[in-house]
Image (cartoon, rainbow, N blue to C red):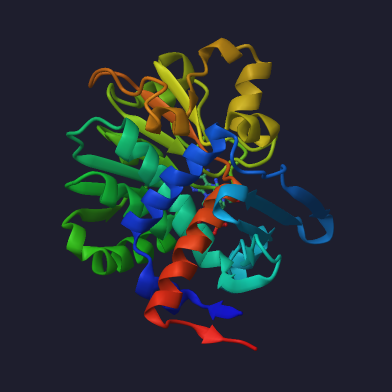
Amino acid sequence: MLLLNREDIKKVFSMKDAIEADKKAFTLVVEGKCDAPLRTNIQAPRYEGCFLFMPAYVEEMDTASLKIINIFPHNIDEGLPSSPAQVLLIDGKTGIVTAVLDGTYVTQMRTGAASGAAFDVLAKKDCKIGALIGTGGQAATQLEAMLAARKLEEVRVYDLNYDRTEVFARKMQEELASYGAKITAVKSSDEAIDDADLLITVTPSSTPVFDGTKIKKGATISCVGAYQHHMQEMDPAILPRASKIYFDSKDAVLSESGDILIPLEEGIITEDDFTGDLGSVIKGELVGRENDDEIIVFETVGVATQDLMAAKTIYDRAVAAGVGIDWK
Ligand SMILES: NC(=O)c1ccc[n+]([C@@H]2O[C@H](COP(=O)([O-])OP(=O)(O)OC[C@H]3O[C@@H](n4cnc5c(N)ncnc54)[C@H](O)[C@@H]3O)[C@@H](O)[C@H]2O)c1
């Protein structure tokens, strides 16, 4: 069994690779080729946390996986990841676990890559300004995915905690210097989204984190954080303005995300307003962006197929490159 930590994964798996792995995963989802039951969620109310178990099996790849990802929102105050995780990769012919991967990093990469895949497929070609709301554990890979998808001049970053925002922006300016964009910490959500072509929201907020009436024409928005019914980062005002609404998986989003469930219940949108899954656009079966004025919304809650595809790609490359610890 191969043990792969964050540094091992970095050696063999870039953000571009993660975006391609996610595109394949979203395609498998719409083809019905991945058996991925909705995740098991056990609540830990004592710590406002929960344990999530996410299994997946793709028969045609002879591969299964199980991610254990536990969401403990107060960890951030202790300098610990809010979503600690491991991914077990399983040989589909024998049922033997072949690898254990740092699931926190796999999650960060594949979750960032979901926004990256959405922007790659749905954003207008000429984008200059990005906005990122949220600077927690998932934020760095969201930012990198945005930069990998489009050549941006500037990304404005906003978080409730301005001190953390400044530290984050400085660190990212250094780490992601090769993308050539200016990373700026700003003090309000309005400042972040002003004139933005791309917007990512990645917070655990239960109230909207941006003003949907102020999003400019032609923008593409990826909302990542709302994985429970009461959570809502997306301002519902954006939905009637959006000409298209896509999902990583409509079934998964409608089973848990307040970003979509609350506006549905309030009658702001109906299911007829949904365009469909990103995988169908990637397969060429569903229309994507049709002009540079459309506002397009993408909602992602994450599917286990993303973990499987990322883990399998990383494992195959690590074996070929002799990376990781072989644990007998
Ligand atoms: N879609 C997916 O596949 C996926 C995968 C992993 C995590 N998530 C979710 O993404 C969200 C963010 O994850 P994380 O690990 O980065 O969380 P985190 O706790 O590490 O950081 C969250 C950040 O959001 C900020 N924030 C909260 N409310 C805000 C508001 N109203 N405006 C601006 N900033 C605000 C906080 O100050 C904090 O810096 C969580 O809800 C998590 O469960 C989604």
Query: In the drawing, does residue 121 fall left or right of residue 78?
Result: left
- Give the camera-side residue of 87 and 73: 87
The C terminus, quarter of image: bottom right
Classify residue 90 by image quadrant.
bottom right
Where in the figure is residue 55, as x and y percent of width and height?
69, 53
Where in the figure is residue 57, as x and y percent of width and height?
65, 51
Q: Is residue 214 above or below residue 26?
A: above
Does the image show residue 105?
A: yes
- Give the camera-side residue of 39 and 127: 39
The N terminus, quarter of image: bottom right
Where in the figure is residue 23, as x and y percent of width and height?
42, 43
Q: What residue is at 23 percent from the left and 44 percent from the top?
A: 150
Where in the figure is residue 24, as x and y percent of width and height?
44, 45
Q: Is residue 6 above or below residue 295?
A: below
Classify residue 116 by image quadrant.
top left
Does the image show residue 138?
A: no
- Give the camera-side residue of 244 and 307: 307
Q: What residue is at 39 percent from the left and 21 percent from the top?
A: 213
Classify residue 292 by image quadrant.
top left
- Give the camera-side residue of 203 and 39: 39
Q: What residue is at 60 percent from the left and 49 percent from the top?
A: 58
Query: In the drawing, does residue 91 fall left or right of residue 292?
Result: right
Q: Is residue 282 above or below residue 132?
A: above
Residue pushed farthest front? Answer: 93
